[in-house]
Amino acid sequence: MLQTPPKKNLKIKLLVFKMPSEYSIANIFFVVVFLFCFSIVETIAQKVYEPWRRYEKTSQIEFGIGTSNYLGDIHPIDNIYSYQSSIRWNTSLSYIKQITPFYSLKIAFSWVRLAGDDYVFTKNQVSKTDNFDINFLRNLSFRNDLKEVSYVSIINLKSGFFARNFKNRPQMIPYFLLGTSLIKHQPLAREIYTQTIGLGEWRKINVSQSKRNIAFAIPTGIGLKGRVSEKFDLNFELNYHFVFTDNLDDIIGRPFPKNELIGNTDFTNRSTEKFTANNGFNRTNLYNIVAQRQGFSFFNGLGTNLFPTIGYPNTTPERGDKKNDSFLMISVKVQYYLSKRDRCKY
């Protein structure tokens, strides 16, 4: 049977919450004033010291220059000679907004020159292996100036913290980047080289019959940022672009179209050209090395054109592969930090 607790226990509990009689109005006032003053001091302390601890968003202007390498049907990505024979240049101008110590966004405009040449790529290889005989006989070349607008996320692998004092930046910050970009391009090729005139003019080419010269790309890469001075950084960046097109070089995975093998004004088949279009090198000696391996007739060097060995009407591999093109950029970039807005310290 349950019993009711004694009433004195209830009185004791109530006495715990009853204010002692010795507390006067003066004492209560003193406590309230003390708490109020303490809150004011705490607020002032936060205004004085907190801005030096709190991260503040910053903005930077960036200028970069460097090299570029085309990777595609002429210069495959898995061959070391591709990175030696296709080196060109790139330049860029960017605006960067640092959102957090680890994350920033960048909008950039880049001008990238790409180039490829079957002869330049194969001249040091055809005497050692027959793996690139078709590339040598194809004898295609191009140049393409890309205009790119990109939107890139940059993630620091080390905190890039700094508040109002720019000197708070770390000495070195590794980072990686990933984004999207829009590229406008137009492949060009030189007209046939002649001994009397020399190098031909650059002409627009569209053997692939592409109706668009706009392409999407995914830039991704890594970099290292180094502090130079209070408001300058120097970056070293490796940036690979996967492009959603196979037309940067105007070579796609289709058979050679029908056209005459002499006087190829539309550049569909340049295998019979005796001299390289970009530099005027005589292809006769290397042609005969390939011809001996493939069972073709030797060329005695007296004619103005080599024998037709690839392309229509011969049954040969397609003009190119079916893989998308890409390119690699290696850049040195200078960053300048824009002045932060002024705030009262107190």
Image (cartoon, rainbow, N blue to C red):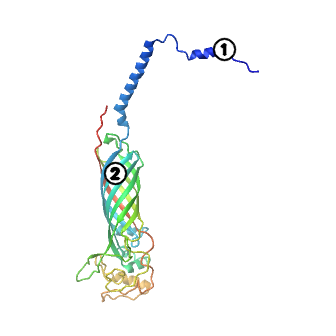
| Residue picked out by circle 1 | 7
Given residues 121 and 138, the one toward you in this image is 138
Residue lying farthest to the left in this orientation = 196
For mark 1, give the secondary structure.
helix
For mark 2, give the secondary structure.
strand
At x 62% / y 14%, what residue is drawn? Answer: 11
Q: Is 18 displayed left or right of 198 in the figure?
A: right
Q: Residues within 10 Å of mark 1 (few under 14, many from 20)?
A: few
Q: Give the x, y percent position of residue 31.
A: 43, 18
Work out which quarter of the rendered image holds the N terminus and state it: top right
At x 52% / y 15%, what residue is drawn? Answer: 19
Residue lying farthest to the top in this orientation = 22
How many angstroms separate mark 1 from mark 2 (CA)?
74 Å
Mark 1 vs 2, N-terminal side: 1
State the count of labels.
2
Q: Amino acid at mark 1?
A: Lys
Q: Give the x, y percent position of residue 242.
A: 42, 64
Q: Amino acid at mark 2?
A: Ile
Compared to residue 172, the image places residue 141 above or below, namely: below
The answer to which image quadrant residue 198 occupies is bottom left
At x 40% / y 63%, what residue is drawn? Answer: 217
| Residue picked out by circle 2 | 96
Work out which quarter of the rendered image holds the C terminus and state it: top left
Given residues 284 and 259, the one toward you in this image is 259
Q: Give the x, y percent position of residue 55.
A: 37, 40
